[in-house]
Amino acid sequence: MDPQNQLCTDDFAGHLAHNCNLSVKAIIAVGAWGNLLHSMGEVEKGREYITTAAEMARKWQQEAFDNEGSRDGGHYRLAFDREGSWSIKYNLVWDKLLGLNLFDDGIGQTETAFYIKKFNRYGLPLDNRSDYTKSDWQIWSTVLTDDPDYMEAIVSAMWNFLCDTPDRVPFTDWYYTSSPRQRGFQGRAVQGGLFLPMLQQHIDHLPF
């Protein structure tokens, strides 16, 4: 539940201990394993994992919340031990899409209400350490809320980047939000993540 100093998916940002978003991924993995056990007929063992994951999610909500500078109404930290920090909690989308419901729906609403205050012309920074972002994870964050204005804000900022960037390369997923410049990466398969809201719309047709 509280990962030690290590890389996470955004490894280009370097090692980070107590990463709240990485913790979310671990908690969801425990819950998903419980669901798999349940589907294989190991009901009691599956229930144990799901219960453990739910307890970890409740603890996460308490320890990750940051009310520093309460003018913004609070948000969830980049790392458990970093007051005033923040990050896109893109891993939360899988709790919703997999139907685990380990985390309160209000977390996503709290986060996106905070994110909208952090926008630059070309998008939402990945976290407070830099003004660069990832296109796929920005779009993932739209699944955390039912607010169409938030989706519009993300898409419009990304459109601004695509229109203004002088970098004539295949759509980069890693770029700056304060200037329309590529930070790195281009034409990568991760851009399939841009279609995640479509997956959400068809979630009822998935075989689990």
Image (cartoon, rainbow, N blue to C red):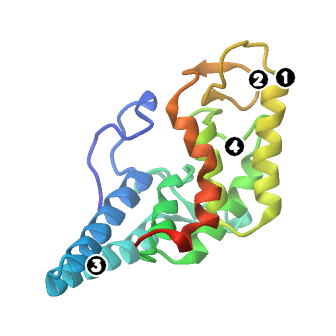
Q: Compared with residue 205, is residue 181 higher up or lower down, i.e. above or below?
A: above
Query: Label 4, on which residue?
Result: 124
Three-letter amino acid code of the residue under disc 2: Pro
Quarter holding the C terminus?
bottom left
Label 1 CA crowd tier, 10 Å (few <14, some 14–19, many 20+):
few
Q: Which of marks 3 and 4 is in front?
A: 3
Q: For the residues marked 2 and 4, what is the alpha-carbon distance in whole angstroms?
A: 13 Å
Q: Which of marks 1 and 4 is in front?
A: 1
Three-letter amino acid code of the residue under disc 3: Ile
Q: For the residues marked 3 and 2, what is the alpha-carbon distance in whole angstroms?
A: 43 Å
Q: Residue at x 48, y 68 (%)?
A: 206
> Is 195 placed left or right of 8 in the picture?
right
Q: Residue at x 33, y 37 (%)?
A: 7
First along the sequence among labels 2 and 4 = 4
Q: For the residues marked 1 and 4, what is the alpha-carbon distance in whole angstroms?
A: 16 Å
Task: In this rendered view, identify the residue nearer to me: 167 or 2.
Answer: 167
Q: Residue 164 carries which label?
A: 1
Asked if residue 92 shows in the view, the reply is yes
Query: Label 3, on which residue?
Result: 50
Numbered disc 4: secondary structure: loop
Query: Label 2, on which residue?
Result: 180
